[in-house]
Structure formats: structure tokens, C-alpha cells
Image: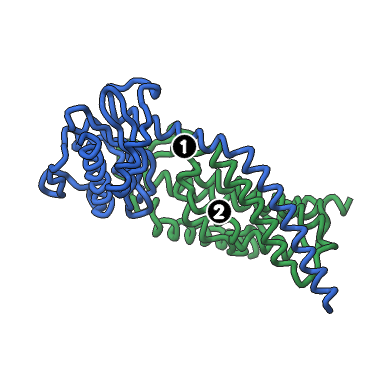
Chain colours: A green, B blue
Amino acid sequence: MEERTNLAQEFKKGIIDQNPLMKLMVGLCSALAVSNRVENGIFLGIAATFVIFFSNIIIATIRKRIPDQVRIPIFIVVIASFVTIVDLSMKAYFPAVYDRLGVWIPLIVVNCMILARAEGFAYKNSILRSALDGLGIGMGYTLVLLVMGIIRELLGTGKIVLFEKTIITLGPVNPPLIFVMFPGAFLTFGCLMAILNMYEMRKKE
Amino acid sequence: MIERILRLGLTLLLVSVIAAAGLGLTYAVTKERILEQKKAEELKACIEALPEVKSPDELKEDRKLEDRIKKEVQGVSKVYTSDKGEVIVVKARGYGGPINLAVGIGKDGKIQGVSVISHNETPGLGANLEKEEFLSQFKGKKHKDPLEIGKDVRAITGATVTTKAVLTDIKEALKAHAISGR
């Protein structure tokens, strides 16, 4: 029984307790850049989750055979391969989104969130645990991108467009563009962190 | 010592070979589709640029002409000819990366339409280059027109670099057309 709760914990911790963006503060650069639209956030989130999930599995599988001295190059090769797979498939099947995400897809390679999971978790844990961990961390990342995307797109453009369909509009207003540009990313992220911290401090008291 | 180094090297080699094989496979699977997508996107923009042309079959590639133009005009990446006029695909450096445009030029040497293939400009500023009110002002322009901001072109507010890149694109397309007519 305890074993099972532990496994669920492995998945859940990435979403809140060890959320890569809100708690570990890794992978921020890409998150700030692409969270200007909900659709971008979803796609980058899925791409990163795919990479982190499979690279965690592969690394956990071969971890006992990896010599300590060359582990980092091996991690990078594994991660880079999955990123390239995502890159090529996205280019082939979702060209419009690929155009907008541009350099951020190949840049998943250097996202420290993923290398940190490989080095800090998958290298020391079983395949199942690593897979769950990867999935959880990826979901946590996607979730924050989604929330930031909703706030920024709605405030910055006055509407949310998903797969070429307008989901919500604020009506005929002149929206503050700043939210879809870089300063808006920092504002939104800062406010989200403040809210989360406030909530946790309240809980502690 | 040597043995250990060898072992490390070989492990790394093995991992890399497996990774390379996997990537080769993915590339082989997606290659065709990527090319198709790119082509389809370009053709769609080309048809939009030349309103009289209704289907992509009417556009023909002319490699000889294209090579001749490329030698003289920078930034031209493709030339399509048809009975109704030419579409010239041009690329200039914008604020956030290359701006690819398809410029349709009729038989009379006047621009019939301009459409955007791809760009990476700032949303809300440079990205306004997609707007009809900006692109439509190039209709009827011909080679040797001044094409200067403030003179015969309205710039995009807050996006001078983007506007200038678009102007470069359009001037180049007109120059290319002048060469092909020669």
C-alpha cells in the first residue's frame, strides 16, 4: 500500500510541490517567451513533456550501464535525440504552430528542467518512478504555461484563440499590448508566484 | 587506464550510434511531409498574391529565369510564371527574423497583390504587416516607384524595421520582374 502512494506521489510532486517553474525555478526562459498565447503554451508544454518523459525512461533503463564520467554527454545525446524527433514531427504535422514557436522547440535541449530530471532523478531511480516523475514535471510545466497563456492572451489581445477558433472575447476594448510582450511575461509570472506563496503561507499558519 | 578510456569512448559511441539511427528514421519519415507543407504554404500565398490565378496548377516554375534573376537580385527565392503574370517569392531581414512575401505582378508590370508566407515579427507591432490595410497599399506599384515611407507608403506604427524590410522585399520583387521582362 505504501508503495502505491509513493508512486502517486512521484507523479503529483511535479505539479505543485516541485513545480519546475513555480518552485524549482528552472526552464523559466522558454516559459516566459512562449506563454503569450494559450496555443503556444500547450504545444511547447506537450513537446517538453514528451521529451522529459522518454528521456527519463531511457536514462533510467540504461542507468546502470552508464559510466559515471561520461554520463552528462550521454544524457545530452538522449535528450537531444528526442528534441529532434519532436522538432521534425512538429514541422511535418503542425507547421503553423512550429513557425510560431520557432527556436524554442530546438532549445528544449538546453532547458535545464530536463537535464536536471535526468541527472537528479532518472539516473538514480527505477524506470517506473522516472516515467511518472517525467510525466508529473512535464504536466506541472504545461499547467503553468497554460495559466500564464490564458492570462496574457486574454489581457493582451482581448480574446483567446485556440486552433483558429475564438473561445473567449472581452468585447470591443483596446487591450494593453504589454501583456503579450516580454514585460507582461514577468508581470504575470511574478503575480502568479506571489499568489502561490501567499496561499502556502496562509496554509502554514 | 587505456582500457577504461576505451570503454568510456565506446559506450558514448554506442549511445550516439543508436540515437543517430533513431533520428535518421524520423527524418526519413517526416522529410517528404515537411517539404510538401512548405510548398503548399508557399503556393497558397502565391495564389493570394495574384488574384486572377485560381489554382496552383496555373503557376509554373521557370528554373532558367529564376537562376538569371537570382544572380542579379538578392533576396529572391522563387519565381513562378503564369499567363496572368508572375509571382516572385522574396525574403528580407525583418525585426524578428526573415520576412517571406509572395509578390504578384501582372503583365503590365504593376503589383496585383502581396501576401505573407511567413514572418516572426512582434505581435501587435510588426505583426501588423499581415493587415490588409498595410499590404493593399502596394497594389498598382511598379518598378522605379519611390516606395519610401512618408512619400507613397504608410509605415506600420512602431515598426520601422519591419516596414523597411517589407519595402526591400517589394523593391526586389519589382526589380526581379523588370529583369524577367527584359
- Is residue A26 among what the camera can see? yes
**In the drawing, does residue A140 fall left or right of residue A127?**
left
Q: Position of residue A165 (x, y in %)?
A: 45, 31
Tell me which amino acid carries mark 1.
Lys
Tell me which amino acid carries mark 2.
Pro
Q: Which residue is mark 2?
A: A106
- Chain bearing tag 1 is B
Of A165 and A5, which appears nearest the observer?
A165
Work out which residue is located at the far right of the displayed protein and give it: A1
Q: Which residue is mark 1?
A: B38
Q: Count the labels in the image.
A: 2
A191 up-or-down from B110: above or below? below
- Is residue B124 among what the camera can see? no
Numbered label attached to residue B167: none
Q: CA distance from mark 2 to mark 1?
A: 19 Å
A34 up-or-down from B59: above or below? below
Instruction: Give the quarter of the image for residue A186.
Output: bottom left
